[in-house]
């Protein structure tokens, strides 16, 4: 019981910030989750902590990971209004899975490599090596979460929900990128 009041205060503060400053709140949340996912990936792998991927995931989350999904979910709600719920959900899901997810995966992989200090050629090489396996894993493992997100989560909380799912995804992505880097060495 003693712990419930601080937790409720934290949730209330988060929701207030989300309402007052949605983009900033989503960006900071994504930064924290991406950074934590990168650190957790390295710890689980038993490696010493490397700062470049941690900073790359943090910067990506702060600059793009909260903002782009914020605008995407707003766009999807405008373009596919809830006329017939099941039909609307199917359209949103197909659009997200077949257009948004492939574009975001390519953008994410390339941008993370650049944020780590790789040049354009090295970033493209890593993108080419990882794109299809990562996209296929995204379709396989994240589709159910996107169905839940689009069907049951209020639009203002969709980025948060996917950020929480994204913690595991950030660990997966960091692991795939690290494995690919180790192959070339």
Image (cartoon, rainbow, N blue to C red):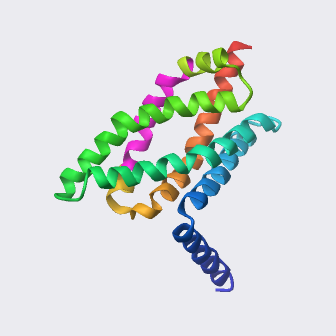
Q: Position of residue 32 (x, y in %)?
A: 67, 53
Q: Position of residue 179 (x, y in %)?
A: 66, 24
Q: Which residue is drawn at 58% across and 30% down?
A: 109
Relative to 56, is 71 on the left or the right? left
Q: Where is residue 11 in the image (x, y as percent from the top left)?
A: 58, 74
Q: In this view, does 4 lie above or below 139?
A: below
Q: How many marks?
A: 0
- Say if residue 103 shows up in the picture: yes
- Say if residue 145 shows up in the picture: no
Relative to 144, is 16 on the left or the right? right
Residue 127 vs residue 64, the one in the foreground: 64
- Asked if residue 8 lies in the magenta stretch, the reply is no
Q: Which residue is drawn at 42% across and 48% down?
A: 72
Residue 23 vs residue 160, the one in the foreground: 23
Q: Residue at x 55, y 42 (%)?
A: 169
Q: In this view, does 82 lie above or below 135?
A: below
For this orientation, the residue located farthest to the left is: 84
Quarter placement of the N terminus: bottom right
| Magenta: main secondary structure | helix
- Asked if residue 134 lies in the magenta stretch, the reply is yes
Relative to 46, is 140 on the left or the right? left
Q: In this view, does 11 lie above or below 109?
A: below
Quarter placement of the C terminus: top right
Q: Which residue is drawn at 63% across and 82% down?
A: 4
Tell me where the magenta segment starts and ends, as one range: 129-146
Residue 48's quadrant in the figure? top right
Q: In this view, does 24 lie above or below 113?
A: below
Q: Where is residue 86 in the image (x, y as percent from the top left)?
A: 20, 54
């Amino acid at each position: 019981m003693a712990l419930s009041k601080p937790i409720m205060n934290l949730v209330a503060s988060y929701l207030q910030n989300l309402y007052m400053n949605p983009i900033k709140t989503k960006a900071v949340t994504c930064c924290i989750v991406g950074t934590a996912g990168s650190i957790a990936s390295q710890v689980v792998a038993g490696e010493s902590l490397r700062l470049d991927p941690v900073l790359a995931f943090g910067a990506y989350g702060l600059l793009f990971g909260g903002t782009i999904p914020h605008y995407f979910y707003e766009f999807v709600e405008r373009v596919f209004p809830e006329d017939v719920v099941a039909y609307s959900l199917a359209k949103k899901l197909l659009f997200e899975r077949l257009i948004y997810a492939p574009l975001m995966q390519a953008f994410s992989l390339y941008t993370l490599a650049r944020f780590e200090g790789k040049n354009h050629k090295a970033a493209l090489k890593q993108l080419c090596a990882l794109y299809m396996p990562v996209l296929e894993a995204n379709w396989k493992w994240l589709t159910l979460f996107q169905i839940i997100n689009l069907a049951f989560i209020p639009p203002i909380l969709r980025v948060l929900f996917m950020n929480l799912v994204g913690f595991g995804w950030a660990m997966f992505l960091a692991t795939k990128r690290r494995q690919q880097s180790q192959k070339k060495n």
